[in-house]
Amino acid sequence: MDVLAWEPKLDDVTLAGMPEAFRDIADAIGLDATRSLIDWRGGTRLSVPHVMKANHAIARQIGTKAALALAEKCGGLQFHVPRVSTVIRSARNRTIRSEFDAGARIPDLCSRFGLCENAVRRVLYEEA
């Protein structure tokens, strides 16, 4: 059985790998808190209180400091938390584009990421 050289893990996703709509939040609360939030509530809408208390579920999940930063940025708002698979796919697609731009061949990218040629081409030619 072939082993892919690229194993998708949420822990490896950087700020640049986050979906664009979620990067501002990730920038405000930090990557670890963002990963925790995605793992906890991915695929759902999250309501952020105006005033964050230490015993709030969000604070217990991502930590008080990150929760306070989230309330400062998004207090009183609701937003969609992306699913883990969406975040990983976004990071993978950015990596594919980056490696292609650096000279990687499409067949090599297919092998590395376990995708067919059409899938790699769709990634390369969709808007980033």
Image: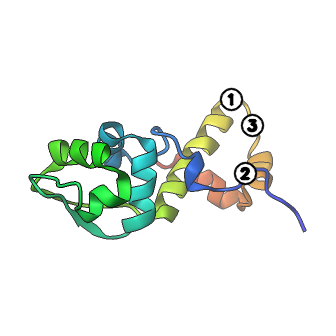
Image coordinates of residue 21 in percent, x first then y, are 31, 48
* Distance in Å between CA atoms under marks 1 and 2: 17 Å
Kindly identify which numbered label has been placed on residue 102.
1
Q: Amino acid at mark 3?
A: Ala
Q: Which badge, 2 or 3, comes first in the chain's sequence?
A: 2
The quadrant of the rendering that contains the N terminus is bottom right
Vertical order, 13 against 85 (above or below): above
- For mark 2, what is the residue? 6
Q: Relative to 109, is 92 on the left or the right?
A: left
Q: Residues within 10 Å of mark 3 (few under 14, many from 20)?
A: few
Image coordinates of residue 103 in percent, x first then y, are 73, 31
Vertical order, 2 against 54 (above or below): below
Q: Residue at x 67, y 36 (%)?
A: 99
Q: Closer to the camera: disc 2 or disc 3?
A: 2
Q: On the image, which quarter does residue 97 sit in? A: top right
Vertical order, 111 against 20 (above or below): below
Q: Amino acid at mark 2?
A: Trp
Q: On the image, which quarter does residue 37 sit in? A: bottom left
The quadrant of the rendering that contains the C terminus is top left
Residue 127 in view, yes or no? no
* Distance in Å between CA atoms under marks 3 and 1: 6 Å
* Distance in Å between CA atoms under marks 2 and 3: 14 Å
Q: Relative to 58, is 125 on the left or the right?
A: right
Which secondary structure lies at badge 2? Answer: loop
Q: Residues within 10 Å of mark 1 (few under 14, many from 20)?
A: few
Which residue is nearer to you in this view: 2 or 98?
2
